[in-house]
Structures are given as structure tokens and as C-alpha cells.
Amino acid sequence: MFIAFFEALKAAGVPVSVREYLTLMEAMDRDVAGRQVEAFYYLARASLVKDERHLDRFDQVFGRCFKGLEQALGEEGHSIPEEWLRKLAEKHLTDEEKAQIEAMGGLDKLMETLRKRLEEQKGRHQGGSKWVGTAGTSPFGAYGYNPEGVRIGQDGNRNFRAVKVWDKREFKDLDDGVELGTRNIKVALRRLRKFARIGAPDELDLDGTIRETARQGYLDVKLRPERRNAVKVLLFLDVGGSMDWHVEQVEELFSAARMEFKHLEHFYFHNCVYESVWKSNARRASERIPLFDVLHTYGHDYKLIFVGDASMSPYEIMFANGSVEHNNAEPGKLWLERLLTTYPKAAWLNPVPQPHWGYTESIRVMRQILEDRMFPLTVQGIDAAMRELT
């Protein structure tokens, strides 16, 4: 079983060695992980993975090789009983029936009502319009429908109407080693180039060597710094939720950008940028980076590129406490404007097909904030964005 796991990791491109495998076997022989799958997962990851970029592939291989074993790799941490949210039925309404259901009337009223419901509710409910439950038209719960609500205990989006998500959600880092589906993405990114010779002089300057040798009368070897693309890029990547549909497309762009730009810093956010961002999705809860630190660390000469579908509740952009995941003291619009003021050369790449942009209010709002500098995540769109940034 463990040899098959080791071979599967190598086949997936995770650079594991026999020495690391033997270290894992020694730890297992000493019963370091006990009989807990979770402990074995972390032990194997610590023993076999040397670079954080390979954590995603390790998780995929681990899941395939040990499928069926119970894994408890996270805790939800909420106090709503699981029985209340158990899926026994699912609500499916016609467009006419949906149109008759009224929204609560604002984010503040929605959250205040939820607090009251949790204080009053004593048991499980299904199919109703008031309590936290399932398969109804209540704003709170799972597998039902409401124009605006708080999604609790559901395994994913169904109607894209939630303005808050109660559950803790885990996202994965994008893999910057993915094979590109097309070389044209790299070609389009190359429009954003400004070459300079920087760094230590470690490249042979043939013309200079010939010139100085002829002038001096003896061999005079000249070196020069390597010629590099001097453009600096800040890349902000939206992850999770509806962006899961576009992971392969965004990973291709991420891979190309990592190879094309030597001065590239990337950060993750979800839906809209707020007071903090993060470098690693596995540690986004504990290692967040204040956005003010980003603004004060990287100079005005950096180019700013957002990648995201900009598809969310308009509350998340325009209102304090509008974030779907936390209570933000200031609206996302304010943080976006701070970024755009600091980095005036900016563009947004959107994986949603451009003909569909008009159907989503948040995309219209985001385009307005970006002063219409939003481009589709296509070869032509990337090419137009790079022209904008130059």
C-alpha cells in the first residue's frame, strides 16, 4: 500500500525520494501517527513534501490512494446541530414561484433576524419559510430557495443567492506547474515586457570581450548582468466558490505568468478584496497579510492584475459587513480604490464569457470601479489587458 502511494506521488510529479520514503516508514514503525488517518496524513505530508507548491498534488494522490478511509482534516466550528441541516429533501421551484418569494430587505435585517431565530429555535425544521432548516423558502439553511439568505450546511452553490456563508470553507492554492494548454497565453503576456540588465555580472559579454581584447592587446574577458524582463507585477487571484469552475483556465495563466515575470508577487482573495489577503489557502485563517502592508511594501511601479469572475452579491462590494465570509469594517469598494490609487496601471481578467457580463450586477459594478479595464480571460483579452498595462 505504501509503495503504491510512493509511486503514485512520483507519477503525479511530486519530487519524492527513497530517503524520504524510508523516513516515513521509520516513523510508521515507531507508531508516530498511531492509528489515526488524520495524523498519518500530516506525517506523510511533512515527510514527503518539500515545497508548498506540491501540496495540492499530494492531497489529490492521498485521496485516491486512501479513498474510503475516514479523514477529519478540518473542523466546521459552528454550533448549529447537524440534525437541523440533514438533507432529507431538496426544494425545486419554478421561476414564477421564485418571483413570489420576497427578500428580507437588507443585510443588517437579515443578520439580526438570524440571531433571533437561533435564540428561539429548539429543533429541526424542513420545508418552512421561517426557521433554520432545509428544503424551504427560509432565508437560513440549505437546499431551499430565497432571493437573499445565509447558506448554512450546504455542500455548494445551487441558486447563487447567498449573501453570507456560515460554514468554514477550504480553498486550494493554484498549481503554478500545470502544463499549459496553449502557448498563446505566454505569447500574449510577452506584450508586457521591459528588458533591463540587472543583477550580478555573470553572463559573457562577447562583443565587449572582443572590443577590449583588441584595444588592450591581450585577452580581457568582460561579463554583464543577464537581460531580464524588468516589469513588476502584483497578481490578485480570486479562489473558491464560483471560481472553482475556472481553476484549469486560471492555473494556465498563473503558470505562464510565473515563467514570464521574474518580479511577480501573488495573493489570494475570495470574491472581493478586503482588509487582508493571503499567500497560502491552507493557512488563510492563520497567516493573513494586511492589505495596508501590501500597499506599503510594493512600489507604485508595480502593475496590478486581478483575476476573478467578479460574480457575487453587490453587498460584498458596496457595503460594510457585506462579505460573504466575515464582517468587514469597510466596504470592498474602498479597498479596491486604495489599490487602484497606489497602482494606477491595473487590469482585471474575467473568466466569465464577455457576452454574459451584462447579466450580473456585481460585474457591472466592478467594471465601473476599474473604469472599464476588465478583459475576458482569453488570448485576445490577455493581449488587450497587456496593452492597457503598457
Image: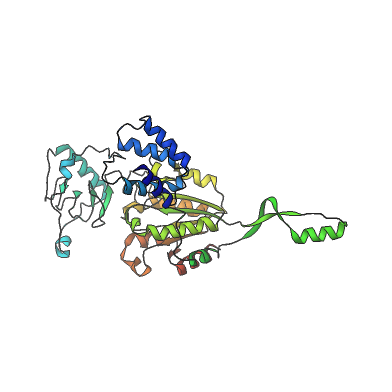
Whole-percent x, y for residue 127 in the image: 11, 51
What residue sits 66% from the left and 55% below the top?
226
Number of labels in the image equals 0
Whole-percent x, y for residue 202 in the image: 69, 51
What residue sits 40% from the left and 36% below the top?
25
The reply, left or right, for residue 319 in relation to residue 143 is: right
In this rendered view, identify the residue nearer to me: 353 or 61: 61
In this rendered view, identify the residue nearer to me: 70 or 318: 70
Instruction: Work out whether residue 140 can be spotted.
Output: no
In this rendered view, identify the residue nearer to me: 298 or 38: 38
Whole-percent x, y for residue 230 in the image: 61, 56
Using the rendered view, name the quadrant where residue 79 is placed: top left
The reply, left or right, for residue 388 in relation to residue 140 is: right
Q: Quadrant of the C terminus?
A: bottom right
Whole-percent x, y for residue 270 in the image: 37, 50
In this rendered view, identify the residue nearer to me: 41 or 367: 41
